[in-house]
Image (cartoon, rainbow, N blue to C red):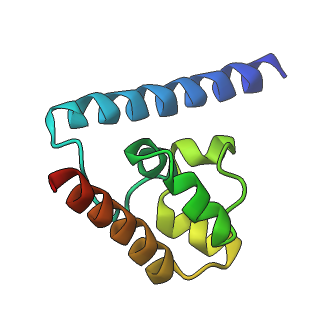
């Protein structure tokens, strides 16, 4: 039993470190980035706090779920039976409008 607990802790540590390293690698990039099907839910939420409302309106209510750390938008949409293209359009449109507003 202890072996399994240690194994689970090791896996969780690896996932955490991998995500932390991915976040650190992206720090030098532009602040405004657009979401793709491979963007994790956590990274999409990090773009702007208003995106949480967009995801909730489309039916993705488990924004604080532990799976959001490593789950891509494509995976989350599949699990929740949501239209990926619709969500990507909404998020990217929101970010484009924000960028345009900030540029004016």
Query: Can you say which quadrant of the picture contains the N terminus?
Result: top right
Which residue sits furthest right? 1
Q: Is residue 14 above or below residue 55?
A: above
Could you say where residue 98 lies in the image, as x and y percent from the top left? Answer: 31, 57
Please state, as top left, top right, bottom left or bottom right, where the C terminus lies in the image: bottom left
Residue located at (15% from left, 40% from top): 29
Residue 98 lies, with reference to residue 90, above or below; the image says above
Q: Nearest the camera: 68 or 4? A: 68
Question: Residue 62: x percent and y percent?
Answer: 71, 53
Identify the residue at horizontal 43%, vertical 52% (top origin). Answer: 44
With 38 as the anchor, is 74 left or right in this view? Answer: right
Residue 78: where, in percent of width, then height? 60, 74
* Drawn side of residue 72 relative to residue 100, left or right: right
- Residue 30 sits above or below residue 94 on the image: above
**Quarter of the rendering containing residue 26:** top left
Q: Which image quadrant is residue 57 in?
A: bottom right
């Amino acid at each position: 039993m202890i072996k399994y607990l240690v194994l689970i802790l090791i896996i969780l540590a690896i996932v955490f470190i991998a995500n932390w390293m991915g976040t650190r690698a992206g720090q030098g990039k532009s602040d405004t980035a657009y979401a793709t099907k491979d963007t994790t839910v956590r990274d999409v939420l990090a773009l702007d706090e208003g995106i949480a409302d967009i995801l909730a309106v489309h039916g993705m209510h488990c924004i604080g779920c532990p799976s959001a750390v490593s789950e891509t938008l494509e995976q989350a949409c599949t699990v929740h039976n949501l239209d990926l293209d619709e969500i990507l359009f909404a998020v990217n449109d929101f970010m484009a409008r924000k960028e345009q507003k900030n540029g004016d």
